[in-house]
Amino acid sequence: MNQSRVPRVLIVLAHFDETRNPEGRPDFIPQGTGHLFLAGAFARDRVSLRAYSEFHDGPLIDEAAFADLDMLVLTGVTAAFDRMRHLTAYARTKSPGCVIVAGGPVVRNLPVSSAETFDYACEGDVEEMQAVIREVFGEWAVSETILPRFDLANWGGPVSYVETSRYCNFKCSFCALTAENRRYHSYDLGYIEAQLRNVPAKKYVLFIDNNFYGNSKDAFHVKLDLIRSLWREGLFQGWIALVTGDFFRDPDNLEAVRAAGCLGLFSGVETLNEAQLKRYQKKQNLVVPQLEAIRTCLKAGVAFQYGLMFDPSSQTMQAMQDELAFITGESTMPLPAFLSLTIPLLGTPLFDECAAERRFLPSAKLRDMDGFTLMTRPIDDLGEVALFARKLSRLDGNRVRILRHCLGFYRNYRHSLSGRQMIHLLANSLRLALPSVLHRHGLPTRSGSDDNLTYVTTTQPLGPLYTPAFRVSEGFRSHFAPTMITDASGALDDTIARNLEFRSSRRQRTGLGSNTAQAESVPSTPAAI
């Protein structure tokens, strides 16, 4: 493209909100940031850029947004593949010459379908965006260093986002990163410092690493030294990070992070059931008893948050209800930050297991891999499990237990946690008890169409996004058909099978799946396009 013309580029974090909320969740923490990292690949002031997050602002349906585009860049989790197809149809209708670029887990897991849909189906990390820009526009449009463009985000709030490493050194059976099968590695200190100096000052920092702790104790402490010095310099007020269960094996780690400005940690507890942890291949959570780790963390003055998952295809209703009853009655641990069903994501060992054992329900849709819709055949009655799923995100029916838990938790940790930390943890509990304030504060709540939802993929309605928001060219109407996981008999859909077979055969040919290969929930992983 001629350098004299400023190209127009739209970068979208594509997302299907599991709550069916059409307005987005601007107050939710964490926000997806992949689109902002991608924006950092473009040279500043040489490209007309717009970055849009459907997670933050809701579905992008403004017809004018797709007019006169030179490039549309799409990222998102695998379940957002259909949404990427919708956006592609919009862009190609309003801007016929627009180049469509897509990447991330969705392209890696659906390589055949992605190559058929997008002009550039990128399977690498965010740096691959630079090569695409160079080929489409020229060297002049490429940024030398990829720093996230938070200036393009339309949100404020108290939190900034920084990434210090990529991928994870563990292989949980349900995790999208296990499907990625790429080597964990840390960034160099210079890039970490550049990010920390790039974010808005005087806020809190959320390190969005999949595993902030990592696989090298020495590298971890060197990173902490840098963070501590920048915190003392006053660049940010404090920070939060995600760590794996093995972090708690060394009690000195808690004192080290607290001395470096850490206010809280998130760790994937997933379940307190040891047998279920083994089923998930989550061996890092067996290193230290989880309740002991949580209590030690809180007593050390570091807030602790976690998520819980339930798998009705391998757990009975009684077992799931017993675990919820224990947690809501155990005031030495906080209530979970989120609850969901286990998602058998494409490419994971859990997906392969469900497919081999024909555990997927008939007419299962990729769009429904949202953690709230039942995808697999449960052990117990389907209707009862669907009702369990309907109540799960809000812990319906547990208001009195939650309020009692809040009081007990406050009594247990009022001396070890600061007022700010206590308020944050108790606010999460109160939102579970008081669903009417959920949406305002960014936690999942269903829209007014809740009564139409079945919470079972076979019968779950697609929703209004599958109807074009404006007229699209006839050749792109097929982009609004859902991607199916299984057919009406429950067998793996031919398109999905073709993608997975291609992906598997290519890995065998190239060795891409080995640990020597070059290096995804929350909604987008910055390491991926």
Image: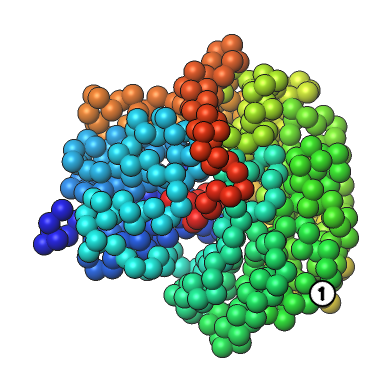
Going by the image, does 469 lie left or right of 173?
left
Dot 1 alpha-carbon crowd within 10 angstroms: few under 14, some 14 to 19, many 20 or more: few
Quarter residue 95 falls in: top left
Q: Give coordinates of residue 490: x percent, y percent.
A: 60, 15
Give the amino acid at mark 1. Answer: Asp
Tell me, yes or no, if residue 328 can be seen here: no
Q: Nearer the viewer, residue 292 or 57?
A: 292
**420 left or right of 80?**
right
221 sits to left or right of 209 = right
Colour treatment of the image:
rainbow
Quadrant in which residue 343 is drawn = top right
Q: Residue at x 25, y 51 (%)?
A: 135
Would you identify the image quadrant in which residue 478 lies? top left
Percent of width and height locating residue 271 = 79, 45
Image coordinates of residue 310 in percent, x first then y, are 74, 38
Residue shown at 60% from the left, 44% from the top: 514
Which residue corresponds to the image point at 57% horizontal and 19% vertical from the top-left?
Answer: 492
287 left or right of 121 in image? right
**Which residue is the extreme one toward the top?**
489
Q: Which residue is mark 1?
A: 252
Instruction: Residue 248: tell me if it is visible.
Output: yes
Single out the residue that lies furthest toward the bottom: 233
Viewer-proximal residue among 460 and 508: 508
Q: How many marks?
A: 1
* Residue at 88% across, 60% down: 292
Q: Position of residue 452 (x, y in %)?
A: 54, 27
Per the image, label 1 sits on a secondary structure element best described as helix
Q: Is residue 299 above or below residue 321?
A: below
Vertical order, 138 against 86 (above or below):
below
